[in-house]
Image: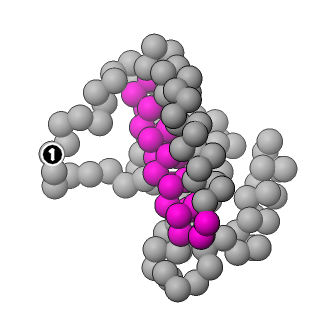
């Protein structure tokens, strides 16, 4: 793991400020979308650090992209813990469900309780 790539992400106060803003903002859509974007950036950073290549995701071109889930699987294959993999997979599921049901509440008690149970089980 190349900590020179990983540490700047985790030591950047702006990242933590964005995360705090994401989880305290009004409206489920904002919370879920901002959280999803931040966790996707975390996954990308993990893959870059694990591969030792800060440009790991560069050069795919405009028409070729990797989904959140594909990046998450890469991160898992690069050593991301199963616990983190499962949590991030659940966050992605909540986001995807909300993207297809924009009028529904994204952060239902069921979704929140599912994340809490996952954390209790694996954390």
Instruction: List x then y, in percent, for residue 83.
Output: 69, 43
- Image quadrant containing the C terminus: top right
Task: Give the left or right position of residue 35, taking residue 71 as reference.
Answer: right
Identify the residue position indicated by label 1 in the image.
61
**Residue at the (53%, 64%) spot, across then down:** 30
- Reply above or below: 18 against 51: below
Query: What segment carries the magenta color?
Result: 26-49
- Reply above or below: 90 against 10: below
Task: Give the left or right position of residue 65, taking residue 13 as reference.
Answer: left
**Residue at the (52%, 36%) spot, across then down:** 15
- Reply above or below: 18 against 11: below
Task: Pick the residue in front: 74 or 111.
Answer: 111
Task: Give the left or right position of residue 31, taking residue 78 as reference.
Answer: right
Prevailing SS of the magenta stretch:
helix
Q: Does residue 89 show up?
A: no
Task: Give the left or right position of residue 87, taking residue 74 as reference.
Answer: right
Q: Does residue 57 show up?
A: yes
Instruction: List x then y, in percent, for residue 55.
Output: 28, 27
- Label 1 SS: loop
Residue 60, quarter of the rendered image? top left
**Residue at the (51%, 34%) spot, across then down:** 14
The color scheme shown is: one colour
**Residue at the (23%, 35%) spot, across then down:** 58
Task: Pick the residue in front: 6 or 89.
Answer: 6
Instruction: List x then y, in percent, for residue 53.
Output: 33, 22
Residue sitting at the far bottom: 103
């Amino acid at each position: 793991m190349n900590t020179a790539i990983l540490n700047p992400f985790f030591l950047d106060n702006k990242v933590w400020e964005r995360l705090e803003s994401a989880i305290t903002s009004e409206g489920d859509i904002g919370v879920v979308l901002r959280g999803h974007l931040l966790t996707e950036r975390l996954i990308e950073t993990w893959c870059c650090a694990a591969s030792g290549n800060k440009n790991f995701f560069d050069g795919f071109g405009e028409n070729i992209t990797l989904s959140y889930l594909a990046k998450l699987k890469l991160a898992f294959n690069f050593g991301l813990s199963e616990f983190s993999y499962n949590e991030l997979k659940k966050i992605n599921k909540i986001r995807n469900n909300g993207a297809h049901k924009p009028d529904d509440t994204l952060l239902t008690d069921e979704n929140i309780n599912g994340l809490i149970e996952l954390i209790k089980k694996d954390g």
